[in-house]
Image: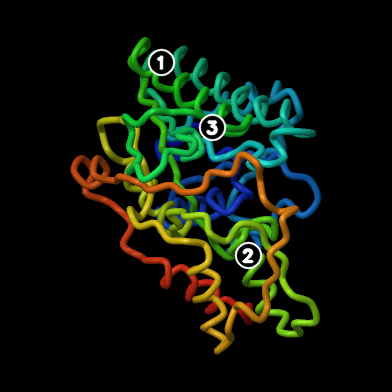
Amino acid sequence: METHKNKVLIYGISGQDGSYLAKKYLEKKFIVHGISRKKGKWDKNLKYLDIKNKIKVFKINKNFNNLHSILKNYYKYIIHLGGQSSVIRSYSELEQETFESQLLPLQIFLEKLKSQKKNKTKLMFSSSSEIFGYQKKIRLNEKSLKIPQSPYALSKLIGYEIVKSYREMFNLKVFSIIFFNHESILRNENFIFKKIFNYLKNEKFKNKMELGNINVIRDWGPSDEYMKIIFKIMKKNKVDDYVLATGNSIKLKEVIKYFFQTKGLDYKKFIKINKKYFRKYEIKENYADISKLKKKINIYPKKNIKDLINQFISNENK
């Protein structure tokens, strides 16, 4: 069994958040282990950040039973960023996978922590603003009503409540972060920022870009900055649950407008609204209240939406 006081295990290491967080821990001289469920080109983000050969990645099997052998290592931190993450697909073919990939490893992690006699591992679970559902004109915080409207949202709420229960019942150093939307160049093409970026990068514009409801309002932040904040939160002695967002929401239409303005283009000439991309249960708007994060941690995002978009544009030739 390996032992090292500065060792971290990141579940979901091949996603945008896991990759950025792994890079941060490597910069701070941690030994980084990761778990990935992905098949195919699972390591492209790690290669993009030039860290693939600096970390040890375990491929997990479907029922997660090989997770027990991984946990024979001692980890200072375990960070749960993994699991099926598509809201729309959680309704259909991936409903079972959504719950299993979010909750099975979480339960195994928590039981492992409960069995530790000393040198307790600290664990963070990534929850989602989807747990709040649609609540019109309300700034959402840790105490807000939670009304999940999708299987994905429900899996994130169950995880949130399980973590809270283990913390209170067994005095474990475990907590959840309720992430609002956050993006980066490492996102896959199913996410709106990457979809717009790829369309503009192509620059052929043979066909209009088809989109759904562009009047939705979201709080979008940069993944890399959020992971730097997570790194700092993990070092705090006291554990608690926090909303992580910028505190500033914006209409998707304005995001699209600014993306196209960076190219000197009028977005209205290049997009087509297609009703088939409208989601029946889509959350029309959300607003974050990050006052607890500011007050208790004094660490919060500083970048705005234009900073995030410019970050995409600066990566155009990479």
Residue 14 image position (x, y, % from top left): 63, 49
**Residue that label 1 marks:** 165
Neighbor class of circle 1 (other Cα within 10 Å; few <14, some 14-19, many 20+) is some
Q: Amino acid at mark 2?
A: Lys
Neighbor class of circle 3 (other Cα within 10 Å; few <14, some 14-19, many 20+) is few
Location of residue 20 with respect to 58 vertically, above or below:
below
- Quadrant including the N terminus: top right
Residue 91 image position (x, y, % from top left): 71, 33
Q: Nearer the viewer, mark 1 or mark 2?
A: 2
Q: Which mark is residue 194?
A: 2
Disc 3 and disc 2: Cα gap in Å?
A: 39 Å
Residue 32 at least partly seen = yes
In the foreground, 79 or 74: 79
Residue 79 at least partly seen = no
In the foreground, 81 or 59: 81
- Residue drawn 59% across the image and 46% down it: 13
Disc 1 and disc 2: Cα gap in Å?
A: 37 Å
Q: Quadrant of residue 88?
A: top right
Q: Nearer the viewer, mark 3 or mark 2?
A: 2
Q: Element at badge 2?
A: helix
Residue ranking furthest to the left: 295
N-terminal label among 1 and 2: 1
- Residue drawn 55% across the image and 71% down it: 256
